[in-house]
Image (spheres, rainbow, N blue to C red):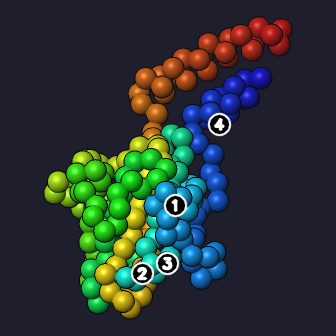
Amino acid sequence: MRTAFPILIAMTAFPALGAYLDYDEVASGDLSSNPSLPSLLATSLGSNFITASVDRRDKDYFTLTIPAGCFLESIFLRQSDGSEATFLSLQAGSTFTEPAESADFRNLLGYASFFGSDVGRDLLPSLGSAAEAIGFKGPLGEQLYTFWVDQSSPAPTAYKLEFVIAEDVPGPGSLVTAIAATCLMIPWSRRAKR
């Protein structure tokens, strides 16, 4: 009885590890081109990858779900082979409301452009500080976020993004509560054995 209670606390204090996302358009099919019905993709703790391509006619829309108790910490560009800038933007929610031809940046949570020279860079700070956008500072909490990836070139541009999901560490108050509850249970379990 003494060991079961602390294990129960440990199990409930942290989210369960699941299979990470590794979406590749070659193997999994084309991402949605419909902003009202983006591809819905579940992320997991750690690194999650999306490998795809866009061109002038093909836009990518996908919604990422951030697990409970977690946040989106970084978005690293891992591949980009286009000769022109590729556009990345996001909105909170399960759809993308801005039309591609006349998007109002004031309705975007953030946006950024990237080139092949940006491989290895974390794009999240640029998204959060984009001019005229709603903007944000730091990581993004558990929620649905819909992304739009676009390219003006007629030639396809392949890209790979790594979405790093981290977990919220319980604050000092949560840890103190868990320790106090464990200490209270130890004398009770000793009495039960007698």
Amino acid on which the number 1 mark rests in the picture: Pro
Secondary structure under tag 1 reads loop
Position of 157 with respect to 144 (left or right) is: left
**Cα separation between marks 4 and 2:** 47 Å
**Cα separation between marks 1 and 3:** 14 Å
4 or 2: mark nearer the eye:
2
Q: Dot 2: within a 10 Å radius of its alpha carbon, few (fewer than 14), some, or many (20 or more) residues?
A: few
**Earlier along the polypeptide chain: callout 4 or callout 2?**
4
3 or 2: mark nearer the eye:
2
**Residue 52 image label:** 3
Residue at image point 35% right, 62% down? 99
Residue at image point 49% right, 57% down? 36
Residue 121 visible in image: no
Q: Dot 3: within a 10 Å radius of its alpha carbon, few (fewer than 14), some, or many (20 or more) residues?
A: many
Quarter holding residue 182? top right
Above/below status of 82 relative to 36: below
Question: Circle 1 sits on which residue?
Answer: 38
**Residue 75 image label:** none
Amino acid on which the number 2 mark rests in the picture: Arg
Query: Split into 4 quadrants, where in the image is the N terminus?
Result: top right
Residue at image point 43% right, 73% down? 59
Q: Dot 4: within a 10 Å radius of its alpha carbon, few (fewer than 14), some, or many (20 or more) residues?
A: few
**Earlier along the polypeptide chain: callout 1 or callout 3?**
1
Above/below status of 7 relative to 180: below
**Earlier along the polypeptide chain: callout 3 or callout 2?**
3
Cβ atoms under marks 2 and 1 closer than 8 Å: no
Q: Position of residue 43 (x, y in %)?
A: 55, 56
